[in-house]
Image (cartoon, helix red, strand yellow):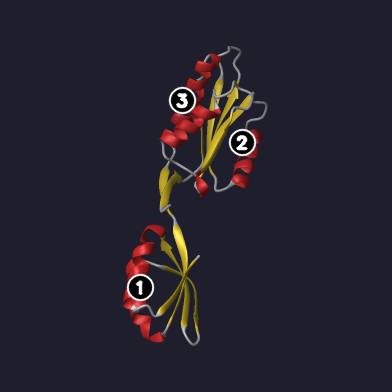
Amino acid sequence: MNGYKTISENIEFEIAPIKKSRFIVCIYKVANHIEVLNSLDAIKNSYPNANHYCWAYSLADNNQFRFNDDGEPSGSAGKPILSHIKGFEVTNVLVVVVRYFGGTKLGVGGLIRAYGQAAKEGLALAKITRVEVQNEISLEYDYSETVNVENLANRYGIQIIKENYSDNISKIIKIVASDKDMFLEEIKNITKGKIKITVH
């Protein structure tokens, strides 16, 4: 994966009441399961005594996703939330729709529409940004290759994480994943293969 879309900041938004039920959508940026759980706890603390906290999330790591109906009829809440996450093509995001029951049952079809609407309206308001995935690479080469390597590194806008100068030059660099293969091909060519490369 070279990159993905996610939200740049968390948002919370309440849609218009549906048959006196309140639906509040909370959209949080998350990177892993721990952050998902912590965010769920924070939302439950912010909106105590709600009847349902239905959610779905998507993580870039191994394209993981899950959803939960939290007591609503199966498939009526978490699944429509997840479908809008996929529709907006965002990842590393948790969408929670908090419901305060208003006294009138909506039926399965009504719930699917309500939870889907909340997720859709919230995601439409979110600021979506693209994140470029980076790869870490170790390079080891002779001092005679310094100019060639540095010129190429500058052209690709490479970030140097660590460098060491002893018998040879050793560097750990970060490069945008989509540029990695071309960079490695070029660096092998300009050094005529006289470079040790380790991709982490």
Q: Are marks 2 and 1 in contact (CB under 8 Å)?
A: no
**Disc 1: which residue:** 187
Would residue 49 appear left or right of 8 to someone viewing this image? right
Percent coordinates x, y for residue 115 in the rendering: 51, 25
> How far apart, in angstroms, are the residues tagged by discs 2 and 1?
49 Å
Compare marks 1 and 3 and give the one earlier in the sequence.
3
Percent coordinates x, y for residue 79 in the rendering: 52, 29
Pick the residue in front: 134 or 106. Answer: 134
Answer with the quarter of the image where residue 57 lies: top right
**Disc 2: which residue:** 43
Percent coordinates x, y for residue 8 in the rendering: 46, 46
Percent coordinates x, y for residue 5 in the rendering: 42, 45
Viewer-nearest of discs 1 and 3? 1
Helix, strand or loop at disc 1? helix
Q: Are marks 2 and 3 in contact (CB under 8 Å)?
A: no
Compare marks 2 and 3 and give the one earlier in the sequence.
2
The answer to whether residue 94 shows anywhere in this view is no
Viewer-nearest of discs 2 and 1? 1
Residue at the spot x=45%, y=32% of the render? 84
Q: Which numbered disc covers residue 117?
A: 3
Residue at the spot x=46%, y=84% of the render? 168
> How far apart, in angstroms, are the residues tagged by discs 1 and 3?
51 Å
Q: Which numbered disc covers residue 99?
A: none
